[in-house]
Image: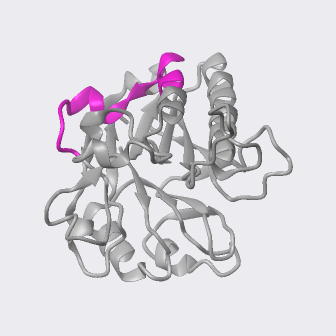
Amino acid sequence: MKIASFNINGVKARAEALGRWLDEAAPDVAVLQEIKSTDETFPRALIEDRGYNLETHGQKGFNGVAIASKRPLEDVRRGLPGDDADTQARWIEATVATDSAALRICGLYLPNGNPVELGDDGTPKPGGKFAYKLAWMARLEARIRALLAEETPAVILGDYNVIPQPEDAARPEAWRDDALFRPESRAAFRRLLNLGLSDAFRLRQPGPGHYTFWDYQGRAFDNNNGIRIDHVLLTPQAADRLEDCTIDTAPRAGAKPSDHTPIIARFAA
């Protein structure tokens, strides 16, 4: 069973690229981020005509997440719990039944957090984008704690907007003060792992040089000047079924690409 994450950077702008990738990679489940479309205006035929069930959580012009699955999507929930005032479309989850069990698929588009605004005491300014990022990560931690308490086989995947370690950037010094690499962001990510989650890619692919995002500027992709910010985290019950996890760089090299590329985890059915 192939479960993929792909920050598409605008589903309408990348419709051709997305359709080509779905045909070639044929994931069983695809979690999309930055669809930049409302639910009503999402080009559903692009997904459904290829045999996928589709659930979206959209927002006009910004953010937005979706799950496409060749199997039925059950118990769909939209929005990360913990803040009823948060209207940004960044979280969707659903259950996908497999031949032997079921997996909870949680798709996320974690806030970027830039610009980093700090007070005189060095802490994030309340109301700023960086403070919102860290608060969102705290809510994510709470949701994951609940999944772990239920012993749910869960795959929590998407664009985390976090560079976990220096080896996850071609030029880590260039990201030192960026919200993606700030100590606070990395510490919040480590707290997720310390709950008992596994980083699927690192279970199979150690070492530097593996990235999921390359800027459009400065021939970043050609020079492999990238960062690894798209992650697949697994509860222990899901990690037991992991067979492999790879980064598919082909879409980034294609026509009119997203600045991200898919990451694909393979599980025993």
Please tell me in which quadrant of the rendered image residue 254 appears.
bottom left
Image position, residue 164 (x, y; %) = 39, 34
Task: Name the one closer to the observer, 203 or 104.
Answer: 203
Residue 199, percent from left and from top: 38, 30
What residue is rendered at 70% in x and 34% in y?
139
The question of residue 135 being in magenta is answered with: no
State the residue lying farthest toward the right.
84
Establish if 126 lies above or below 224.
above
Q: Residue at x 61, y 77 (%)?
A: 42
Residue 223 in the figure: left or right of residue 145:
left
Question: Which residue is pictured at 39% across the width and 25% down the height?
Answer: 239
How is colour applied across the structure in the image? one colour
Number of callouts: 0
Q: Position of residue 81 (x, y in %)?
A: 76, 40
In-front residue for pair 70/220: 220
Along the line of sight, which residue is nearer the eye, 45 or 214? 214
Quarter containing the N terminus: top left
From the viewer's perspective, tell me whether residue 110 is left or right of residue 264. right
* Relative side of 71 to 136, left or right: left
Q: Is any atom of residue 244 visible in this view?
A: no
Q: Which residue range is magenta in the image?
A: 190-210
Q: Is 173 situated left or right of 150 in this image?
A: left
**Magenta segment: does it hold 209?**
yes
In the picture shown, does residue 203 fall above or below 180? above
Return the residue nearer the eye: 134 or 40: 134
Residue 240 visible here: yes
Q: Which quadrant would the C terminus be assigned to in this image?
A: top left
User: Residue 180: image x %, image y %?
Assistant: 46, 45
Q: Is residue 50 above or below residue 246?
A: below
Q: Residue furthest front?
A: 120
